[in-house]
Image (cartoon, grey):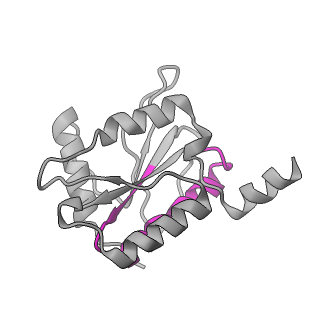
Amino acid sequence: MQVPCDAMSGLLESYARSTNADPPTAAAIALSMLSNRPITPLVRIPSDSLLPDLSRCDVAAFVFDSRSPSSFQAAADMMAAVSSAAGESLPCLLVAAKDDLGMAPALNEEVTLVCGDMGVPRPIPVSVESGQMNDVFKRLVVAALLSSEDHVPDTPARKVDQLAR
């Protein structure tokens, strides 16, 4: 499934303008920020290819179009796959792009159910168009540095592991 990238592009271009980095396009962002390792500000994880080595990632953000159920489903599926591939310990955040248009009501219900089932916070709403970024980059850094269990998705494998403890 191909994920529309216009919302992701806008968010990443906003990041690029704020850091003077080259503006990559992606369906997911992985940030590596700890000072004891080389910093990789953004790693592109295409939705239609194999996952890269995630051992240097400290947090992953999954951007979706807040008006598109298929975009959200692709982001949720990728979040589960990335979390599993990263050993069930990578903090993950969902980012709802195009928030100036408002989230579709049916999608809002689905988001509530999926976030509750996966045990992750609701998406961070952002709008590059209106400049409302809701401290998304700061929130990514906080999730990475605190490695909060609140941001690690409860994938099926993680749920089994938690029951076994």
> Which segment is the magenta one?
61-90
Residue 107 point in image, percent of width and height: 38, 74
**Number of numbered labels in the structure image:** 0
Residue depicted at 30% across the width and 74% down the height: 104
Q: Nearer the viewer, residue 40 or 122?
A: 122
Name of the residue lying farthest toward the top:
36
Name of the residue lying farthest toward the right:
164
Relative side of 86 to 49, left or right: right
Q: Nearer the viewer, residue 93 or 43?
A: 93
Residue depicted at 23% across the width and 66% down the height: 102
Residue 22 in view: no
Residue 72 point in image, percent of width and height: 41, 70
Residue 91 painted magenta:
no
Relative side of 43 to 16, left or right: right
Relative side of 163 to 29, left or right: right
Residue depicted at 53% across the width and 53% down the height: 52
Classify 56 as above or below 10: above
Q: Nearer the viewer, residue 136 or 7?
A: 136
Which quarter of the figure has residue 125?
A: bottom left
Residue 12 in view: yes
Classify 49 as above or below 18: below
Q: Nearer the viewer, residue 159 or 15?
A: 159
Name of the residue lying farthest toward the left:
130
Classify 123 as above or below 143: below
Q: Quadrant of the N terminus?
A: bottom left
Residue 70 painted magenta:
yes
Residue depicted at 53% across the width and 67% down the height: 114
Classify 132 as above or below 48: above
Residue 67 point in image, percent of width and height: 28, 73
Residue 91 point in image, percent of width and height: 55, 44
